Image (spheres, rainbow, N blue to C red):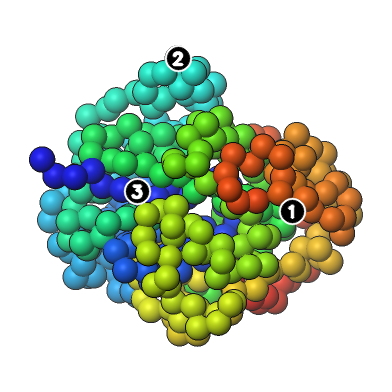
Amino acid sequence: MNPPVRVLYLAGSGRSGSTLVTTVLGQYDGVFAAGELRYLWQRGEVENRPCGCGRPLRDCPLWGEVRRELPTDRAAAIAAGLRGRLRMRGLPALLRRHRRGVRPVPAHPDDAALADLYAAVARHTGARVVVDSSKLPPYGALVGALPGIELRVLHLVRDPRATAFSWRRRRGLDGDADPELMSRPPVGKAALLWLVWNTVTVRLWADRAPAGYLRVRYEDLTAEPEATLRRIAAFAGVDPAGGPFTGPATVRLTPTHSVAGNPSRHRTGPVPITADVQWRHDLSRRSYALVTALTAPGLRRFGYPWRRGGPAAANPAGSGSSVAVGSGRSAQVRQPASAGHEEG
């Protein structure tokens, strides 16, 4: 019998640093930066969007090997099935099943193809750890229930005012030249998504700490990049000494084969890791107040201040680790300039 595939699943809200973490981890020996694997079937197979290496996914030699073991003729149906199974309206039932100790996402015939995907990735890359930055908690729960999977959850959290601001930026799905834009939800909806996904992540996995769950804040990651990435690597089960750091806050990146994610996954060469703090100045007072009010239950839990510029808690209570839908008005933001390594 083959050993289980260890999957490091990055969970939480978007724009919290997942692309950065995935790309850096992909530079460690024995780690494969797979990117957002829940999108493989639609964005990769159906739309043939670029792999992290720059080639269209169906032209990438590595993914060509993996795809030979998958039912690619059913990719569109599998993608549609995942969208239906992972809808937000199913969260209450998912959490009830979790509390009863049964499988949170009911079994489905497509699960065999999903299990084959992770097994094929591990086999053709030789990776001991597959990093999946899909973030969506229901998909993480689905993956954790697949046969042959050993799931470890890295919960990435960022100040909700920062994530709401970042979501409003106009950005091509695969870079500036891409006419298709990444999702741009209004700040009210972005705030509610932040609250829901982070709360569900805690409820699903926080009790698995320290071996199966680790929480890391974007702000701590960008304050101490090397130390934090070493801690994450150790949690994933790889040698933390073998990373790509050329200085405490600089990494040298080589191409990965990540699927989907922030366009910054294509960056290579020397890359500084710095905090993107433009939101502190450019997020309007009205938007700041709206996001703060909607996410109030999560601010204290994750150690974030209510007031703009207030001090964040160094080690928020209840971190569960050794590291510290609705509508809303659109954010009033100025056209952003590039600021450091953009979050995932």
Q: Relative to the observer, which residue lies in front, 171 or 19? A: 19
Would you place residue 123 above or below residue 13 in this image? Answer: below
Q: Are marks 1 and 2 in contact (CB under 8 Å)?
A: no
Residue shown at 71%/40% (left/top)?
Answer: 317
- Residue 299 at what x, y percent from top left? 76, 42
Tag 2 or tag 1, which sits nearer the N-term? 2
Q: Are marks 3 and 2 in contact (CB under 8 Å)?
A: no
Amino acid beneath label 2: Arg
Secondary structure found at label 2: loop
**Image quadrant for the C terminus?**
bottom right
Secondary structure found at label 1: loop
Question: Closer to us: mark 1 or mark 2?
Answer: 1
**Image quadrant for the N terminus?**
top left
* Crowdedness near tag 2: few (<14), some (14–19) or many (≥20) residues, C-alpha within 10 Å: few
- Residue 182 at what x, y percent from top left? 54, 59
Would you place residue 110 above or below residue 36 in this image? Answer: above
Q: Relative to the observer, which residue lies in front, 146 or 279? A: 146
